[in-house]
Amino acid sequence: MPQLPVLIIGASGKTGGRVRARLEKRGIATRPVSRSTAIPFDWARPDTWRVALDGVSSAYVTYQPDLAVEGAVEAITELSRLARDKGLERLVLLSGRGEPGAQAAEAALQASGIAWTIVRVSWFDQNFSEGYLMDGVLAGEIALPAGAVAEPFVDADDIADVVVAALTDECHANKLYEVTGPRALTFADATAEIAKATGRPVRYTQIPAEAFAAGMRDAGVPADVVSLLDELFRVVLDGRNSRVMHGVEEALGRRARDFFDYAREAAATGVWDA
């Protein structure tokens, strides 16, 4: 086990919080960082990176808002260099499936000289219960610019388990895991699974991409996030990620969690009670 704490960049996110809880349950100290923590970390302020990396054993890295955006490759390149110079054992990077910009950032990490593990994912199950799709579930209608293209939605708990394995076992060094759920679903399919789990009507409606972007802007969503989501629906959601991959099995030796099991357990918590 690492004697020094594990740095978690993005500890308040869907996977970062889960990774932190799992490590601490094992008795492994963590250093969660953000712009507002005692030791700050801000992707927009490289001067904060060096201190955050002082005295840690390894790091889990999530880039905000997404590795596909401009500047991400340069940021990962510099962070990797600093981590190598400070003697970190490994960086575990959360990356995006089917995103050329994300793959360029992966290549920068792989070329840095530090041991690495890349966990490549796409759409999270938890977007429906902890993210921007939850309001639609509560309202009884999820409206998105996504058609009949299927995606193998992945559970954030599976992602966290793979990340923790990578941070605590050297056998995962210099490996790339493409992590998905065990079957591909359209957004309409996923919505139907949620309706079944909740026992109440929840329908899916496909809307034009322009209307989706306008609605986000009207709701006050930051322009960079609107642009990112617009690209994901227009470009990445074209079938390139429909194939089920086996990163969970490769890393953990078990089957990935099914979307229906996620929906049933989320419904049982009352998170979708109208």
Image: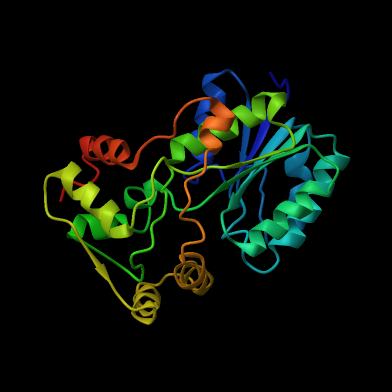
- Image quadrant assignment for residue 247: top right
Residue at (51% x, 71% y) in the render: 235
The extreme left residue here reads 200
Q: Residue at x 70, y 66 (%)?
A: 71
Which of the 4 image quarters holds residue 19?
Answer: top right
**Residue ID at (84%, 41%):** 84
- Residue 135 is left or right of residue 27, and the answer is left
The quadrant the N terminus occupies is top right
- In x, y percent, where is residue 5? 68, 28
Q: Residue 190: x and y, percent? A: 29, 52
Q: Viewer-proximal residue, 116 or 244?
A: 244
Decide which of 51, 127 is in the foreground and name it.
127
Would residue 218 be found to the left or right of residue 162 on screen?
left
Residue 20 in view, yes or no:
no
Q: Is residue 130 visible?
A: yes
The quadrant in which residue 89 appears is top right
Judging depth in this view, the residue of 18 and 161 nearest the camera is: 161
Q: Which residue is farthest right? A: 85
Instruction: Check the image and report above or below for 212 versus 40.
Output: below
Horizontal and vertical percent position of residue 118: 66, 43
Q: Left or right: 86 with respect to 169?
A: right
